[in-house]
Image (spheres, rainbow, N blue to C red):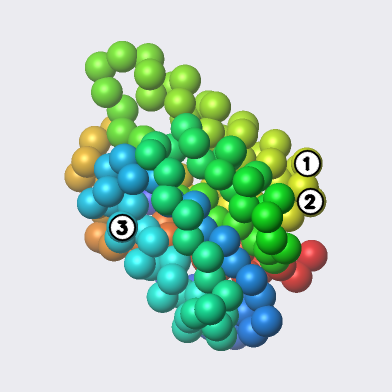
Amino acid sequence: MATELNNLSSYNQDDVPSGEKCIIGIVVSEWNKEITSSLLHGAITALLDNNVDEKDIYIQYVPGSYELPFAAAALIDKKKFDAVICLGCIIHGETPHFEFISQAVSNGIMQVSLKTQIPVIFGVLTTNNIEQARERAGGKHGNKGVEAAITALKMTQL
């Protein structure tokens, strides 16, 4: 596995642009809330650590990951965001549902970003089991929420 020995959330603070004056939206799935709450905490912490003002972080909850693209587009329609972060967790089950949802969410997020010309960041875990999700939501592989926040800040510079 590519991430087996890595904490993917480590970053060099000097390589991250300041988030001062950035307005960031975060859309969070309520499905697999144990995981998505941790992702959200990581994202908020990283944004605050990189000078985004707390009042400039807008959070929108949605029922599941499938709803992330629609909510991201709705946020962008309501307010001028510098970036929107989508956080979710899709865990493989016994049916093809995982593949359908994962594909739809990833394509949907990309389409919103391309259509709106606003960076919409894919912070969605797609794992085989809950343990893999925990490892990527604050466990031994770091926190994908942190990675998504750092990506958002870097993308605001384009």
Q: Are the residues tagged 1 and 3 within 8 Å (C-beta)? A: no
Residue 86 badge: none
Helix, strand or loop at mark 2: loop
Amino acid type assigned to the residue bearing label 1 in the image: Lys
Q: Which residue is mark 2?
A: 117
Amino acid type assigned to the residue bearing label 3 in the image: Ser
Q: Which residue is mark 1?
A: 115
1 or 3: tag closer to the N-terminus: 3
- Residue 80's image quarter? bottom right
Residue 96 horizontal/vertical position (percent): 37, 15
Helix, strand or loop at mark 3: helix
Q: Residues within 10 Å of mark 1 (few under 14, many from 20)?
A: few
Q: Is residue 26 visible?
A: yes
Q: Is residue 137 visible?
A: no
The quadrant of the picture occupied by the C terminus is bottom right
Q: Which residue is mark 3?
A: 37
The span from disc 2 to disc 3 (Cα, nearest Å) is 27 Å
Q: Are the residues tagged 1 and 2 within 8 Å (C-beta)? A: yes
